[in-house]
Image: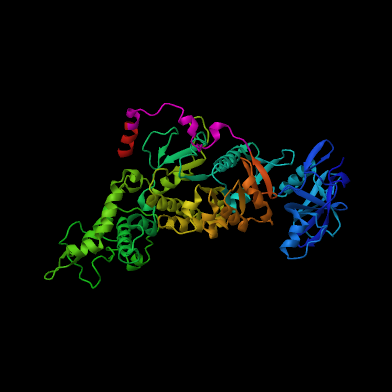
Amino acid sequence: MNAFDLINDLKIGNIVEVSGTTIKVELSGNVTELTRTHDGRVYPIGQIGSIVKVHFGRRLIFGFVTLLRMRSEELLETAKPIPLDADQRIMEVELFAEGIWIAAERKLRFVRGVTTYPLPLQGVFLLTRQEAVNLYSAAEGQQGSEGYDPLVPFAHYVGADNALCRANIDKMFGMHCAVLGSTGSGKSGAVAALLHSVLDHKASGDMTCKPRIVIIDPHGEYGHAFRERAVVFRAYNPIRTETESTPIQLPYWLMSADEFRHLVIGKTEKEATSQNNIVNKALTYARMVAADLVDAAPTEYGAPAPMDEMAPDEPRPKIGVTQEQITGFDRDKPRPFSLQEFYNHIVYLQAARKKNKGSDLEQITPSDFSKTFKSVLDKLAVLRRDTRIKFLMEEWSDSSPSLARIVGQLIGVQSTENGKSLDIRIIDISGLPNEVAGPLTAMLARLLFQYKLYQSMSERERDPVLLVCEEAHRYVPDRGEAEYAVAQSAIRRIAREGRKYGIGLMLVSQRPADIEGTVISQCGTWLVLRLTNSADQQHVARFLPDGLLGMTKALPNLAQQEAIFAGEGAALPARIRIRDLSVDKLPKSETAKFAHGWSTERLSEDEINVVAQRMSG
């Protein structure tokens, strides 16, 4: 039997209506079961997401099954009378491609889209397993590139004789992607399987990929999955963890003025006015002092008041510095500055006034100081004492790490003693408070974007970066949360502009309906596992391409590790099964086993005391 022959045993019905790329098929009367047997194989009939074909001689048209129902239901929706014989079964199919089978070459010439539309009464046929393999292979074959292979096998097509499913990572990561699924659907495992497949892939000859991947990990689960190929940076480590980790170096001075302001004062009623100005002035001045543009602020009251008409807290250029340098200073660039200088500017310049008699500066009244400046200084003091964010608030000095060293820890070359490349950088932020996790995420996203922004074209081509955001609904929520406002802005910019500069975004979430629409709509590839929430299903249906709205009906019933794979990175929209991983390559995200835990001996009082000491230590 040749592939794509017209075989009557595989016919399941006839077309009764053609409406654009949607056709309606009336199932034949001899279709009485859910399966059809041919050539020793059993083929399911009318499964949502399965592929059928229409013959035009050597030309073939392919479509997805999106809906099955009775003719009477269709008539009922349109308020038409239902005749007694309206018991036909109707199958709706979304046409997506066509092709020509070249028998001599045993090859399918595949074309996305439909130019030749079928006619009513034409037959509709099932695909054999081999035909499905040929179809997917032909579609993937169109995505190859000269000199290297961007197609990474990471799954198998369901119902296509276990054919490998390969993702085009050029398109998947370059045009951003989303991995979505309810809790327990295998979402983290799918991310791990895809990234492990990338690490093992040989894109050019025998050279395996050495990717630059940064994962923001809010639950500390990915270190276990990539322990041999990753550097795990832990922001806060109250106990010894199973996975070795490295203290991260992400000092406060990397933050933009907006990020630092959110960290220091958060969301308050007066944020937009006085407190906003206090932080911005002090930050700008402290950075100018570090850049040697202005003199340091006084360290006590009684300093001489300025003789010009400007306020005491205004920056005045040092000798040899022009006013244009002061005016054009960019306070948002990642330049070091001293927290003590920041403090001094607020206390001894902003909170100072001229004495009634004399030319020295004195403190404003205690009531004015308390009303205007005290809350900012108190919050700064609290942050500097918080052991959870010591990595962030450590005072800058000449021995502090440089910007190049900080960026290098995220994407620079690192390897193990036996020469294995450590290509994935995991930022474990578990245990951090929300008011810190938000600005920290924003700082990471913006730092990576700025790094790409200042690269030359050739540098970008050699150094693409992928940012993986686990629990993406925290960082870019659809309903604005104050703690993540700056993170939302930073990640939104990568979603809109990252493709131009070689930085890709992978959003991972169990609550797609809670992710900001403008960000998630920028994703060109979708890997959607089981979704049980109807709001999430509807949200995904708004963005799924290729007329796949009907396939969203299958989302609640997908098996563990099964997914709908669609978009730019997929050769064809398809139902796939993610590859299996050994236990040591899976994220540490198991659900607690209550029956097992409750069947073992309880923690002793001494063990509880140890935990309590960790909590209070």
At 49% from the left and 48% from the top, the residue drawn is 471
Q: Position of residue 487 (x, y in %)?
A: 45, 55
Please name whichever residue, 392 or 360, is drawn nearer the observer in this view of the structure: 392
- Which quadrant of the view contains residue 85? bottom right
Residue 9 placement, left or right of 449:
right
**How many numbered discs, if any?**
0
Which quarter of the figure is the C terminus placed in?
Answer: top left
Residue 398, x across and y down, in percent: 31, 47
**61 and 76: which one is in front?**
76
Q: Which residues are magenta?
A: 579-608
The residue positioned 56% from the left and 40% from the top of the image is 189
Quadrant of residue 184 within the rendered picture: top right
From the viewer's perspective, tell me whether residue 125 is left or right of residue 243.
right
Q: Quadrant of the N terminus?
A: top right
Q: Residue furthest bottom?
A: 309
- The magenta stretch spans residue 591: yes
Q: Position of residue 425 (x, y in %)?
A: 48, 42
Front residue of 18 and 317: 18
Magenta region, main secondary structure: loop
Which residue reaches farthest left?
357
Q: Is residue 382 magenta?
A: no
> Colour scheme of this structure image?
rainbow
Vertical side of 221 occupied by 396: above or below: below
